[in-house]
């Protein structure tokens, strides 16, 4: 189905998460919206969403039009990947409000985490409002590699590494789970690559070889590394080259 390329201005704001259609109309009529640097007070003004680098501002804050949200976030410790967190704040609170309320086809609005990281796990987290993209990235059939940097409680040895590579049995599945790659960086630093995702998998795999995870950080998904300049708690849009590293064309 071909994507709609021309929108009323109020429809555009609604699609980008700036509230109900009525609220978007109000923002425009009150003179709080500019498009490509020019004030626009007509909610029905037609906007070509295929205009290169379509910029607009809402209440003085600059934005750029994105048909879908594809984001990366450097998850800090102490946040849950849940819309209804328990003891810890939600990772979604690190995103601006429009990204949290973009309309989607499902019941839950806004950008959704592509998989989850435990509250004490840090590192690269992808978010999107594109359900097909989320499904592809999470599908066990795609075997998307994810690299984790592990701080172990006890010194690591080749026997533990070899067991992780050959497969260990977890308590909820008789089929051995293998690491796609495993490298001892230092006596207490292990770099582990997984292509599937099970509940607390890294922690349970380390426990299965007689060790324990003291610190866990995801540094890479597919071909995409966590940028060194993206600090904990910060997020940014994924560009076309970064989407290519994830096997996703932005035109899909």
Image: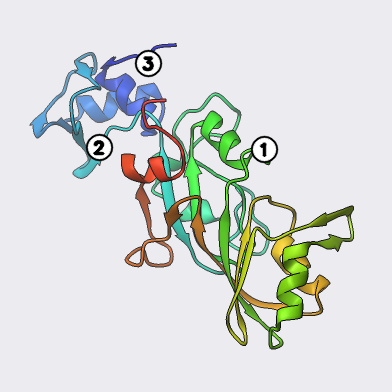
The x, y position of residue 160, in whole percent, is: 75, 77
Separation of residues labelled 3 and 1 (CA atoms):
28 Å
Q: Name the residue beneath numbered marker 3.
A: 3
Q: Position of residue 128 (x, y in %)?
A: 48, 39
Q: Dot 3, crowdedness within 10 Å: few (<14), some or many (≥20)?
A: few
Q: Which mark is residue 64?
A: 2
Kindly indicate the quadrant of the structure image that contains residue 107.
top right
Question: Which secondary structure lies at badge 1?
Answer: loop
Which quadrant would the C terminus be assigned to in this image? top left
Direction from residue 120 to residue 56 in the image, left or right: left
Structural crowding at the residue carrying mark 1, measured as other residues with C-alpha within 10 Å and reported as few (<14), some (14–19) or many (≥20): few
- Residue at horizontal 46%, vertical 38%? 247
Measure the C-alpha gap from mark 2 to mark 3. Answer: 18 Å
In percent of the image, x 35 and y 67: which residue is there? Answer: 228
Q: Position of residue 110 (x, y in %)?
A: 49, 37
User: Whole-percent x and y of residue 77?
Assistant: 55, 69
| Residue that label 1 marks | 141
Ranked by sequence position, the earlier of labels 1 and 2 is 2
Residue 176, relative to residue 59: is it above or below? below
**In screen coordinates, is 142 left or right of 19?**
right
Which residue is more in the foreground, 192 or 124? Answer: 192
Q: Disc 1 versus disc 2: distance between alpha carbons?
A: 34 Å
Residue at the image point whose x is 56% and y is 61% from the top: 147
Quadrant of the image occupied by residue 216: bottom right
Looking at the rendered image, the quarter that the N terminus falls into is: top left
Q: Is residue 136 left or right of residue 55?
A: right
Towards the viewer: 182 or 31: 182
């Amino acid at each position: 189905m071909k994507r709609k390329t021309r929108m009323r201005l109020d429809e555009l704001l609604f699609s980008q998460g700036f509230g109900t259609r009525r609220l978007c109309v109000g923002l425009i009529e009150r003179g709080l919206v500019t498009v490509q640097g020019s004030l626009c007070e007509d909610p029905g003004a037609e906007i070509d969403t295929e205009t290169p680098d379509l910029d607009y501002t809402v209440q003085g804050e600059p934005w750029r039009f994105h048909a879908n949200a594809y984001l990366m976030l450097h998850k800090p410790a102490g946040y849950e990947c849940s819309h209804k967190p328990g003891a810890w704040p939600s990772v979604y609170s690190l995103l601006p409000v429009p990204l949290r309320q973009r309309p989607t086809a499902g019941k839950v609005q806004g950008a959704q985490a592509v998989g989850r990281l435990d509250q004490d796990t840090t590192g690269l987290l992808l978010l999107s409002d594109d359900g097909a993209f989320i499904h592809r990235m999470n599908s066990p059939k795609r075997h998307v590699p994810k690299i984790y940097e592990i701080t172990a409680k006890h010194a690591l040895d080749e026997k533990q590494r070899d067991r992780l590579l050959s497969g260990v049995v977890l308590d909820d599945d008789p089929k051995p789970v293998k690491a796609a790659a495993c490298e001892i960086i230092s006596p207490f630093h292990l770099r582990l690559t997984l292509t599937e995702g099970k509940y607390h998998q890294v922690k349970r795999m380390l426990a299965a070889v007689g060790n324990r995870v003291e610190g866990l950080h995801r540094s890479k998904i597919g071909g995409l590394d966590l940028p060194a300049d993206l600090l904990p708690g910060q997020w940014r849009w994924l560009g076309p080259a970064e989407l290519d590293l994830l096997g996703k064309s932005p035109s899909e």
